Amino acid sequence: MALEMNFLALTCVCSLLTAMISVIVLMQKKKSEKKIRKKLPPGDMGLPWIGETMEFYKAQRKNRLFEEFVQTRRAKYGKIFKTRLMGSPTIVVNGADANRFFLSNEFKLVISSWPSSSVQLMGKDSIMEKQGEAHRCLRRVIASSLSCAVLEAMVPKICHSVESHLNKYWHNKDQISLYRVTKILTFTIVFECLLGINVEQEMLGMFERVLEGVFAAPFAFPGSKFSRAKRARKEIEKVLVDIVREKKNEMEGGLEGGEREGTLLAQLVAGMIRGEISEEEVVDNVVLLVFAAHDTTSFAVAMTFRMLAHHPNCFSLLLRENNDILSKKRDGEKLTVEDTKKMKYTWQVARESMRLFPPIFGSFRKAIADIEYEGFVIPKGWKVLWTTYGTHYIEDYFPDPLAFNPSRFEEPIQPYVFLPFGGGPRVCAGYQLAKLNILIFVHYVVTRYDWSLQYLDEPIIMDPLPFPSQGMPISISPKLL
């Protein structure tokens, strides 16, 4: 009996201790949650789950995300504020210090965070989904195909593509859609010059259908954008798998120069042969890089011509620079990488155009730990949204920020202020290729054609990336040489 009573007493004591510990843990948890709530940035989380997503999308479609969504909240709450977007609690940050903090702490405090639809369409094995060493391994392979030596050898190929493009789409025409035909050109350059793949006529259409669904709701019901995009993605995958396997057989059989060929596809397949990456990774990264390289570049080209049309004095300076380069070339002689280095004012114009009309709005990161920043706490699992406009349009970094002033790029710009290609470990690997595309195309157009925009203030909309709503029609006539 005494033993039973002692056991019962011990059981009661254990139960009491367990209850006390549970209460203490619960109190600590509530205290911690209360502490986090107190330290969260100001802002409005909006409706449950939906949050402020509808306001975000509405502003996005008009390409006024900064003015109608970010700037209004920034004015009310400060340069860091909370909201809820697409079901996720989100902290929006602005300024070079925030860009530096979050972009340079990739893999340490934050990781890239894309919508489910984007991941499914770009590919779960693409570099945008890779973290840490897996990301670094793939980036090394891609960077090796965009080295200075490779880019130098690529310049004549890009010149050839531009000349062929002008002969096909501009010759004997008095009007063209600049943005639309430039998309064809940048798509061709990515495939033929970077990847070493011949472009089939229907391929651009396939990629365009995929792009339509990258930010759509990930519901594959018949007729939806996402459903159409998924079908197009499967068609692309089928084509690319055949190309990758053919390239692998050629390289293993010694029929090609292997990695010495220099194309990105050859580098990726060589990594596959060595067992460093899989066939799925090769295909997914080709898909991603095509999107990353051609849509953003064609928009940057279009905005460069838009701003030149608005500022004839800037166009005169740019034209003089390019005519000087042309005057030193023999008839039919192609540009060299040294010629592109002389296009300093042309690149200032392009950079200022991208500052005012950045090809990307920004991107999301996800906190992988509780983050203390600017006296606030960003809880683990929350999203962080940085924006290009958060520095591009701020007077502290660019005096009179709405004015078009290419000369502001005569002096070096401080890091994490000008971000049309992102920053940190995930900065666009194709930045230098995009630069060459822009400079070479602008050179050939302004030295061979007189041109004028039909609509000086054509609205820019987003679906899902920014583009001129009418395709930027221009009137053209060949110069008399």
Image (cartoon, grey):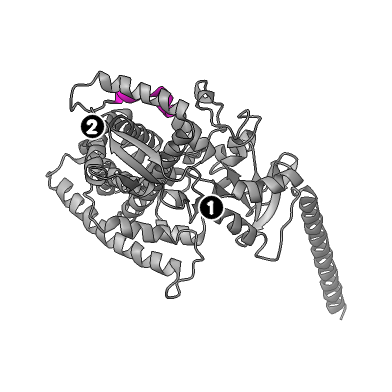
Quadrant location of the N terminus? bottom right
**Residue holding disc 1:** 113
x then y, percent, for residue 357: 51, 41
Q: Which residues are magenta?
A: 337-348
The residues bearing labels 1 and 2 have C-alpha atoms spaced at a distance of 38 Å
Q: Is residue 360 left or right of residue 257?
A: right
Image quadrant in which you'd find residue 13: bottom right
Label 1 sits on a secondary structure element that is loop
Q: Amino acid at mark 1?
A: Ser
The label nearer to you, 1 versus 2, is 2
Report the residue that reaches farthest toward the bottom. Answer: 1
Question: Circle 2: is it few (<14), some (14-19), or many (20+) Cα within 10 Å?
Answer: some
Q: Specify which label sits upstream in the sequence, 1 or 2.
A: 1
Q: Amino acid at mark 2?
A: Pro
For residue 156, which numbered disc appears in the image?
2
Q: Is residue 329 left or right of residue 386?
A: left
x then y, percent, for residue 21: 81, 62
